[in-house]
Image (tube, helix red, strand yellow):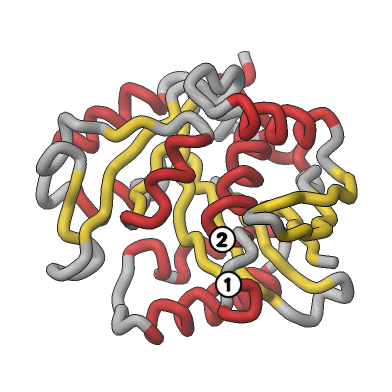
Amino acid sequence: MITLRAFRAIDDFETCQKFMYGHRAVLENIGIHKLTSSKDEWMVNPGVFVIIVESEDRTKVYGGARIHVAEGTQPLPIEEATGYLDAKIYEIVKNNAISGTGEICGLWNSREVAGMGIGSVFLTRACVIIARQVCLQSLFALCAPYTIKMAQMVGYQIIYDLGNNGTFYYPKLDLVATAMILNDVNTLSLADPTEKESIMSVRENLNQVRKEILREREVVLDYRLEIPNIDQWYNSGIIKNLIK
């Protein structure tokens, strides 16, 4: 059984380090050595939430993803990655930050779980699931070509006003990334009905064991998505206005 566990980055430095090393190893295997979302400043950012894919005993890490909240102290990774190419991203993020926005980034999985959907499918779902818990109304993402379809399945849309019809050469000149946004985290009006049903079901019970079927393969996942110490986030100056 594989566990998907959510936590605030500043609450679990040790696991954040495991995430960072695993992410870097995956990137280096495909020739990427510098990436905005792989910098380690996020580990001390109070507006970052992590979902880790790990073994039951927490000794092995198989993948992960993060949500960065637009809270004023650090730009979102999508701003750092594309702002120098198209400054419109700053205004788009600013307008969405008024009601609460963030970004899914740093999504990766190891070869041990390749083909199981842990990366593109279940981690994307898990991020959308916890976004409501974090009080966000929208989510950005900078998607590799193979993750666009999954993003659209949960309700993301391409931001055609940015770059070249939403695309940028990133993280290097021979790779293309697409800027996308999920405008309605709570209702998921554009999501595929099956994806929406799965997300809403886990939102109703954030800690549960579920049998999931993907590509005719059964995977047993232990969802541990109720974020510890979430009251500290709700009571922080960062998020107070959004809750109101």
Residue 28 picture location, percent across and down: 38, 84
- Disc 1, SS: loop
- Badge count: 2
Q: Residue at x 55, y 64 (%)?
A: 43
Query: N-terminal of the two: label 1 or label 2?
Result: 1
Q: Which picture quadrant has residue 216? A: bottom right
- Disc 2, SS: helix
Residue 181 picture location, percent across and down: 38, 33
Quarter of the figure with the N terminus:
bottom right
Task: Name the residue furthest top.
Answer: 244
Residue 122 picture location, percent across and down: 64, 52
Mark in the foreground, 1 or 2:
1
214 relative position to 46: left or right: right
- CB under 8 Å between discs 1 and 2: yes
Residue 119 - label: 2
Compared to residue 216, the image places residue 101 above or below, namely above
For label 1, the residue is 114
